[in-house]
Amino acid sequence: MKKTLALLAASTALTAVIALPALSEIRHRDHEEGVLSSLFGDDGGRLRLWFVSDDDDDHGYSRKYRGGDDDDDDDDDDDDDDDYGRRGGGMNPAPAGTVAPPQNGLFGTGAAPKVKVN
Amino acid sequence: MKSLLATLALSTALTAPGLVSARPVTFATTLNNYGGDGAYLAYYVTDASGAYVGSLWMAGGKSKYYEHLSDWYRATGGNPAEINGITGASVGAGRSLEITLDLADALFDAGYTLHIDAAVEDMRDSPNEIAVPLTAEGAGTVTRGRRYIADFSYNY
């Protein structure tokens, strides 16, 4: 417990030592000079910038599908075992043979649909 | 009294099926070899004024792609209830789909038109690729599509 408190105090002190002068510079500096000059000085000193990451993009995913669709990369819907589940949001319709056709006046009361793919 | 009831029951049994007279109708659709994924196809009917009446079949089971069947989608809002029980798999390029449905007789020779919207992932949408009047005369007539559908016909 004592060690933890000591570590906490040390890190707080370190942060204060680094941050407080910068904060006071920012407040007193002309706003147009910006934060960076407050931190690094306005003497034209070299700024060292590091490129961190741009991993918030979509990895170049093709958006050729019109309508701005946001479907997943791993979709595969050109076979006979379409996923009728509920993943990915939006209700999928019930497949033929599981429920009666819609009551839209177009269907008789007879046989279920028959499908043949060649 | 008993004989009257028996007669009534018999006449009802004979009459009831005729109230919704229907026939099996086969839709035959052949796709071109367009070199892409399986096609989604929406089969639906409009009346003489062009108003949407109802859907007959949906080839393709994932609702998130339905917006690409744009005319159908505009008419239905993509509501899955319109196609519950009449949905099957999408159809591959170069393949043929035959669907036999029990359809009301009243659909024929009454100004109704059958439409087919087609769409393929990463390719251009093709709304209303097929539009044919539902008539006795039109049965057996082959209609060519303009993009994904090589030909379509219906028979009964």
Image (spheres, coloured by chain):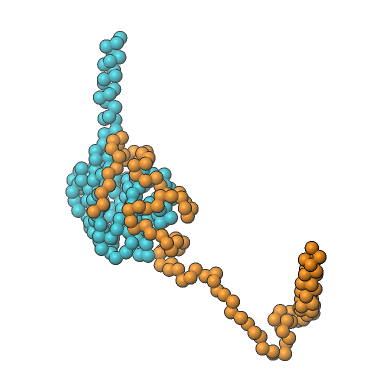
Chain colours: A orange, B cyan
Is residue B60 found left or right of B31 in the rendered image? right
Q: Position of residue A93 (x, y in %)?
A: 40, 47
User: Does B10 sit left or right of B72 as displayed?
Assistant: left
Q: Quadrant of residue B34?
A: bottom left
Q: Is B57 rendered above or below residue A71?
A: above
| Residue at figure coordinates x 43%, y 68% from the top left | A62
Which quadrant of the figure contains the N terminus of chain B? top left
From the top left corner, tell me how far across and down residue B134 is, in percent: 25, 46
Q: Quadrant of residue A55?
A: bottom right
Residue lying at the far top of the rendered structure? B1
Q: Is residue B55 visible?
A: no
On-image quarter of the C terminus of chain B: top left
Q: Can residue A50 be spotted in the picture?
A: yes
Vertical order, B2 against B109 (above or below): above
Write the residue at 25% across / 57% down.
B95
Pick the residue in front: A7 or B85. A7
Residue B68 at x, y = what percent? 39, 58
Quarter of the rendering containing residue A113? top left
Q: Nearer the viewer, residue A74 or B109?
A: A74
Task: Return the x and y of residue B64 as percentages of the image width and height.
Answer: 43, 55
Eyeballing the image, is B125 above or below A86?
Answer: below
**Left/right of residue B29 with respect to residue A59 in the rendered view:** left
